[in-house]
Image (tube, rainbow, N blue to C red):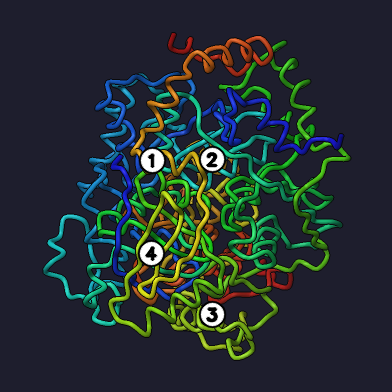
Amino acid sequence: MAGKTLFDKIFDAHIVREQDDGTVLLYIDRHLVHEVTSPQAFEGLRMAGRQPWRAGAMLAVPDHNVPTTNRLRGIDDLVSREQVETLDRNCAEFGVQEFHMNDKRQGIVHVIGPEEGFTLPGTTIVCGDSHTSTHGAFGALAFGIGTSEVEHVMATQTLLQKRAKTMQIRVDGKLGVGVTAKDVVLAIIGKIGTAGGTGYAIEFAGEAIESLSIEGRMSVCNMAIEGGARAGMIAVDEKTIDYFRGRPFAPQGALFEQAAADWRTLKSDPDAVFDKIVVLDAATIEPQVSWGTSPEMVVPITAKVPDPAHEPDPVKADGMRKALAYMGLTANTPIEQIAIDKVFIGSCTNARIEDLRAAAAVVGTGKVAGNVTLAMVVPGSGLVREQAELEGLDKIFIAAGFEWREPGCSMCLAMNADRLAPGERCASTSNRNFEGRQGQGGRTHLVSPAMAAAAAIAGHFVDVRHSSFEG
Amino acid sequence: MQAFSTFTGIVAPLDRANVDTDAIIPKQYLKSIKRSGFGPNAFDDWRYLEPGEPGMDHSLRTKNPEFILNQAPYDQASILLARNNFGCGSSREHAVWALTDFGFKVVIASSFADIFFNNSFKTGLLPIALPEAVVDQLFRDVAADKGYQLTVDLPHQVLKKPNGETIAFEVDSFRKHCLINGLDDIGLTLQHADDIHAYEARRRQTAPWLFLDQASRT
Ligand code: SF4
């Protein structure tokens, strides 16, 4: 019999029961909750007179609606405020631990889960949020669910699931200097397309993935959903295990070592069979910039805006034309000639300490270009912010003309006050460039933190491999 | 959940691939803590000419006459026809709520994003994936016949065209059973509470570090 994939190992370990048609009742170890997708689920519990099955398996945090300035004053937007207060009330009523808006540990749900050791290897982790795939970076099975399923997990600690197909995406070889995890995942999505992973759990592997830091691995798994896969995952190694030592929710002492022994088995067997294998050569990956309104519309910084006239598939060509019109771009324009209005460094893709370090290193003593009206850095959590301040990164950003904000989702989806005006063009380290994502009519270009910082200083996209602003 | 019965409805063609959930229901409406009332804001950015915010009287906003769902008879449509990867992006179930609140009972596309697909069944919206060539033909049919209608027969898993032709479709048997009977998943799962307890008891032995929280409900 062939060996097991990492996905199969975790899935099998969580089967409560299996129906004849292959539908599995899957046990859920960890449930992260935020204010946007939970109110109707709590309300459902209340209406049915149910209690959470295991409130201690939940951790809640408000992140989407919170302001990133002047937070002690509270939330100005009444509707946003009501949603955050509803979360507070629900958590108090149902005994769910919550990091409140002004708690130092507050942050984007996918940043604080690992940071607190709430996320652990080998677990099943869900959240009413598609970027739950992030937590797969630790050898966990993590995926986003809708509000009805949020209620289902609250009430039963399980989900009804079918086994996903498995895909291995291997990135062989070494990445070039200036090429980051974000570029890797954008290049992968450019290759497989936004529906390429539909129905699959993706395991990222290969030398280039193994050599990524934990933060980089999170960026890659974070965007698995942009490739259509609900779950992205990476095998456990010693980097993974070391990451959890001393984290508040992680086991300590002898129990940690017992857990670690188990975690070391969390990798696909050498003879495991995947339903699909995709291979990329790390050496060919360049810094990436998205040009359109879907994450698959991405090209290397050295390229030009693609021309729909060269696209043989009429549906695709039509999609490209619509995207160019929305983005206000002309086909065949070199990417480096695209000027930007705003810069956003943040989101659950790229707002961890390593991301801020990478951006600050590029900024150096440079200044934000005159045509850039707003450049902002929004740390992923209060603890990331604190660490960055300890290292003096905030001073580098502020001296350059960036705004240094408080943690939250912010302009990743513009549910709070941070947003693009119609027609504004943004270099963004977030994960989605959909129409209106960062504000109605706003134009998003997805890039790595280093590329966003370089663009902020230059006022247009530049190849971070050749740009030096020091001096 | 309401039981899903056989019906005949108008098909609205939305000729786009990768229709994402941000487009189906823009983020500002996710601030609602309710489960209903999203219909007027389905496809908000495409549907109205000026920006919208929660709490507005949306009937007073200017509708974009070019947008298909603003044109009669498609404003009465109950079947939405679109291209591949429908519902990609965020997990927001509000996207399904917005579509059902608008009046849609079925979405036909050549493929769906996983989370949207899952969410649909939970709210009584039936997503039907058909081969690209079949979807292409349906787009042609609809273009040739304004107000084109299809009959959706879930028990027999067929779509019936006005000319009597039928198109068979796949649907997971358990989900079909739940839809037709309007069953609540949670109630069904809780019938297996003993199995869940037994699983937890086993896991506490093999992986005690996962149970550092207070005891689960007994
Ligand atoms: S940062 Fe963006 S993608 Fe991540 S959870 Fe928040 S809104 Fe979603």
Query: Which residue is label 1 attached to?
Result: A147
Describe residue A165's horizontal placement relative to residue A59 as left or right: right
What amino acid is labelled 2 in the image? Val
| Residue A111 tag number | 2
**Disc 1 from disc 4: Cα separation:** 18 Å
Q: CA distance from mark 2 to mark 3?
A: 37 Å
Q: Nearer the viewer, mark 4 or mark 3?
A: 3
* Residue A399 in sight from this viewpoint: no
The residues bearing labels 2 and 1 have C-alpha atoms spaced at a distance of 21 Å
Q: Establish whether labels 2 and 4 are both on one chain.
A: no
Q: Nearer the viewer, mark 2 or mark 4?
A: 4
Query: Type of residue at label 3?
Result: Val
Q: Chain of mark 2?
A: A
Tell me the residue at 83%/63% (across/down). Answer: A281
Instruction: Report the Cα–Cα distance between label 4 and label 3.
Output: 18 Å
Amino acid of disc 1:
Thr
